[in-house]
Image (cartoon, helix red, strand yellow):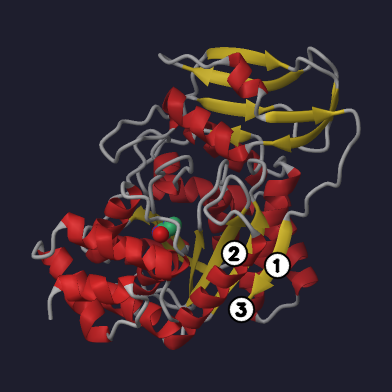
Amino acid sequence: MTIIDIINKKRLNKELTREEISFAVNGYVKGEIKDYQMSSLLMAIVLNGMTDRETIDLTDIMINSGDVLNLKKIDGIIVDKHSTGGVGDKVTLVLGPLLASLGIKIAKMSGRGLGHTGGTIDKLESIKGFNTKISEEEFIEQVNKINIALVSQTANLVPADKKIYALRDVTGTVESIPLIASSIMSKKIASGADIIMLDVKVGNGALMKNIEDARELSHLMVKIGASYRKPTICLLTNMEEPLGYAIGNALEVKEAIETLQGNGPKDLLEVVMTLCSIIIGAVKKIPHNEAESLLFKQINNGKAYKKFEELVAAQGGDINEIKISDKVFSIKSDKSGYINKIDALKLGEIAKKIGAGRNTLEDKIDYEVGLVLTKKVGDYVSKDDELVKVYLKDKDVSISEILSCFKIDKELTNLPKLILDIIK
Ligand code: URA
């Protein structure tokens, strides 16, 4: 067997055997297969796809390329929630403490942002002292003690995905449903949770640009989860406009705190409440409306926010030290009318450009910068009303570029739905 035979077989749209996939993936992890050969195979997969059997084998081979976390020492059902990536997506920061305050165990390994999307780990690190790199023992101990720990992925968890994902990112091979499904599910299964809740973002700010692709990805991930007897639930949510108002690390943490204190944006709250109710339903077998009233109670009695404080303290952070730049500019509307669209992808790119994200894994993030929308889709604006506040440090923004992210018309068109589907 040679890698060239395997590339040619996939180029001819033939189904690869488990042995062939293993030869390619493990050979690449060991450095025996070169970047250019792996990227050629990945491009053949992007163009010709994979059968479900090939995708399940690929996931399994990736899981076995490194460590698998054993969370048996944690009492109770462990939940992992994961988003496929969006703009302004601070859901984990709200959902985690909220569920933990109800006794649900959240043992979560999160990622950093890359491209136009943010990552939970970067957001948490905007809190001074917050340590996302705790040992496996400390991780387990913390979940047993306070029901929640949010940490970055350990070095040897799915090393095949780390290497392949980095290559995909620079070879135009990210957008493939079997590659995305196996990448996400290998990490979720290796992280050891009992229930996997996936927030599949759909729209221009997301990887899945349309509902059909999002459904296909979701069905595939549910099928992979089932092959490991891990109940996997996908909630498909709209990512045409940013979620909430804030985009940028410290700004998003502040918005998450406001949400935990009962003053959150409507759309963020709706996504959090829907995901939490589904999780509570799966863990405690409670109907949706009962779960929702439990959740609101935890926000109103201050217990959800208290759990966030506990989490920050447990991981060494100082909740009073979340710095935001004091160099603030107001961007005003150049016309009157209804906001029919806010381009999440473009705003995510702008936030990245001013330092809120990175272009390469080595780039340093500026936690204090970002954008805060003043208006959302459906709002009416008059000329010269503020649309966005921009928090800057050493890089500038183009006003016209920001204004071009807003589609403002005389008439209001149909408002998009936020919760699009649930697949399990
Ligand atoms: N998130 C992942 O972890 N992997 C992908 O391939 C895409 C999104």
Residue at horizontal 56%, vertical 50%?
206
Real-space Cα separation, disc 2 to disc 3, in angstroms = 13 Å
Q: Do the residues labelled 1 and 2 touch (CB within 8 Å)?
A: yes
Question: Where residue 421 is drawn, which disc sits there?
Answer: 1
Instruction: Provide the residue designation for mark 2.
Output: 214
Instruction: Tell me: residue 98, above or below residue 105.
Output: above
164 left or right of 219 in image:
left
292 left or right of 214 in image:
right
Point out the image quarter for the C terminus: bottom right
Q: In which quarter of the image is residue 145?
A: bottom left
Q: Quadrant of residue 20?
A: bottom left
Residue 33 in picture, x, y percent from top left? 13, 64
Q: Is mark 2 on a helix, strand or loop?
A: helix
In the foreground, 139 or 301: 139
Instruction: Tell me: residue 201, above or below residue 337.
Output: below
Residue 399 in picture, x, y percent from top left? 60, 15
Question: Where residue 424 is drawn, which disc sits there?
Answer: 3
Instruction: Tell me: residue 287, above or below residue 369.
Output: below
Real-space Cα separation, disc 1 to disc 2, in angstroms = 10 Å
Local packing at callout 3 (Cα closer than 10 Å; few below 14, some 14-19, many 20+) is some
In the foreground, 258 or 3: 3
Residue kind at label 1, given as amino acid type: Asp
| The quarter of the picture showing ligand 1 | bottom left
